Each structure stands twice: as structure tokens, then as C-alpha cells.
Image (spheres, helix red, strand yellow):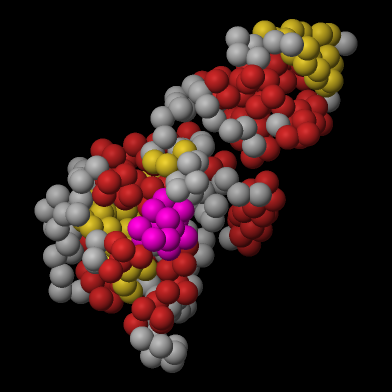
Amino acid sequence: MTEEQIHFQNPASIQTVFGSYDQNLLTLQKEYHVMIAGRGAEIFVTGEPEGTARAVQALRMLGELADQGQQISEQTVRYVMTMLSDGEAEAMKTLTHDGICLTVSGKVVRPKTVGQKNYVEAIRKNTIVLGVGPAGTGKTYLAVAMAVTAFKAHEVQKIILTRPAVEAGEKLGFLPGDLQNKVDPYLRPLYDALLDMFGGETFSRLMERNSIEVAPLAYMRGRTLDDAFIILDEAQNTTSEQIKMFLTRLGNHSKMVITGDITQIDLAEKRRSGLTEAMKILKNIEDIAIMRLNEKDVVRHKLVQEIIRAYEKFYQSRS
């Protein structure tokens, strides 16, 4: 058995690292088979040498994140442990405290993983970004946050949100109500993100002014979208023709973010996904970035990562 001591410059960060009811502490202890105790500005770690060394490294990294103002959730702890296990600890140091924007509740929206940080940087630097990854990686939410930031900074005059309204081809006729009623259920994740960042009253006012537009993908045809931040969500369910049509709507002083999960293609059998094709066709064009997020970037419940890995393993065994 060995014991190591860590000194925290900011004692307040210790409570942040430990988490509510020491939940984060319990996660670290279980993973590394160590005992961890805090006394003032010091943390003491006791266990076998290898487990102790890993726990100390994780605690130091979590302390740095806490010092930057980040909230340390159980997901954050598991992400740090994964990065350490994969030998990618240095990459964690590129995460900064810089936020994208504030929600109406005052919460700072910021990248929580290295993959998310690279995705956000790609959106800042490029005119078109394809963000591809599994559910829970924040690809849609972060894209909306970037759109809101650009709108508030007067970099664009409009936010346009679109997606294939029905998985196999935008067949809206059987749904009740007008166009907005038909489309709304399919755009709920985008609405929720905008409501988080604008609040209900401002969001409604911007919708009335047409500063925020939400429409099915088919309604983009024939338009030129100038001075806009345009997000195409669920792009894995576009056909080749649809995504080409969408891409060629790009106007002056605009940005496009296209998000999708190529493991959840719902198109009819034998139909090629426009997203997978676009990833191949556009990969060498300057000012277009293709960003891939993976299970490490999942910021939902810890089981989501396990579910994604289990399905990937299953599909690989069948191929």
C-alpha cells in the first residue's frame, strides 16, 4: 500500500471535484480501488501503487477543470478516466474555461470533451461543417449554441433550422394541422436548445420576426440563404439529391452546420444516405470540415456510452 498527497491551490475546487454527496469520489475509488480523503486543501489517496498513481492523475486533472469554472459531473469523471486509460491525458489540457454562450438560467454552454472542443473550433473557422457522431455527443446542441452566439454578435441576421421531417422522405400530408404543426414534432430538439438560450418570450418574438426560421428540408429548394446560420439536423436521413440541394443554398456571409448519426439511417433499403456520400465527396474542399465525434464525447447518462459500444461490437461481429 502507498499514500500520496495532493495540494489544491483553491480549496473550493475540492468540493467541486468530490461532487454532490461525494459521488465523484466514490466513482474514482471504485475504478482505481483506492481510498480518498480530503483535509483542508489537501487530498490523500491510499491504495496499490498503480491505482494510486492513476487516481492522483485523475484528481489533478479534475482539479484543473474545476479551477477553470467547470462543473464536475460523474460523466466528467468517467471521461477523464477514459482519456487517461487511452493515453490521451495531454489532450485534456486543451480544454479551456471559455464558454460559447449563456442559457437563460445563467448556465455556461461550453465544450465538455476534446472532441466537442475541436467541433466548436471547426465551426468557428469554417463556412461548412459536417458533424457526425452518435446520440448524446452534443453535436446539435453545440451547433445551436454557435448559431445563437453568431446571431447575438450580429454576424448573421437569421437562424435557419431544418431537417428531413419524416425519416423516409418528408411525407407530411397525413399529419394534422398546418405546416408548423406538422413539422414541430420533428424539430423538437432544435426548439428545446433555442428555448434554453433565448427563453420563451424572446424565442417567440424572433420567430414572429422571421429571425428564426424552422422548416422542413424540402422548403429550402430554390432559395439562396444569405446572412444566415443554417443547421441541417438528422442529415443521415437525407438522400444524395436532398443534401446537394441544401448545400447549394449557401449564400453570402452564411455558415452551415450539418449534423447526423450514420448508425441511425432510416432511409428505405438500398437508398444511399446523402450524408455518407457528402462526407466522401467534400473531404478535400477547403473551408469545409468533417468532424467525427464518438462514444467518448457522449455527455448523457453513462449507460449511453455502454449502449453505443455494445451495438458497435454487435454490428462488427455480423460484418
199 inside magenta stretch:
yes
- Relative image position of residue 87 (x, y in whole percent): 58, 25
Q: Position of residue 179 (x, y in %)?
A: 34, 82
Depth check: 213 or 280 in front? 213
- Taking the image as shown, residue 24 lies to the left or right of residue 244, namely right
Please report the residue visible at 33 percent of the width from the left and 74 percent of the height from the top: 216
Tell whether 296 sits left or right of 138. right
Residue at horizontal 24%, vertical 42%?
A: 153
Q: Is residue 107 above or below residue 15?
A: below
Q: Is residue 11 above or below residue 316?
A: above
Magenta span dominant secondary structure: helix
Q: Which residues are magenta?
A: 190-203
Q: Position of residue 46 (x, y in %)?
A: 83, 14
Question: Which of 99 and 282 lies nearest the eye of the viewer?
Answer: 99
Q: Is residue 267 visible?
A: no
What residue appears at the point 68 percent right and 46 percent down from the top-left corner? 302
Using residue 138 as the reference point, say whether residue 238 is left or right of it. Answer: left
Nearest the eye: 154 or 56: 154
Q: Residue at x 15, y 74 (%)?
A: 222
The residue most toward the left is 252
Q: What number of labels is visible?
A: 0
Residue found at the far right of this picture: 1
Quadrant location of the C terminus in the rendered image: bottom right
Locate the N terminus by quadrant: top right
Q: What x and y, as percent, mark residue 27?
A: 76, 33
Can residue 70 be seen at all in this image of the molecule?
yes
- Residue 37 sits in which quadrant? top right
Tell me where residue 186 sits by quadrant: bottom left
Q: Eyeballing the image, is 46 above or below 24?
A: above
- The question of residue 317 being in magenta is answered with no
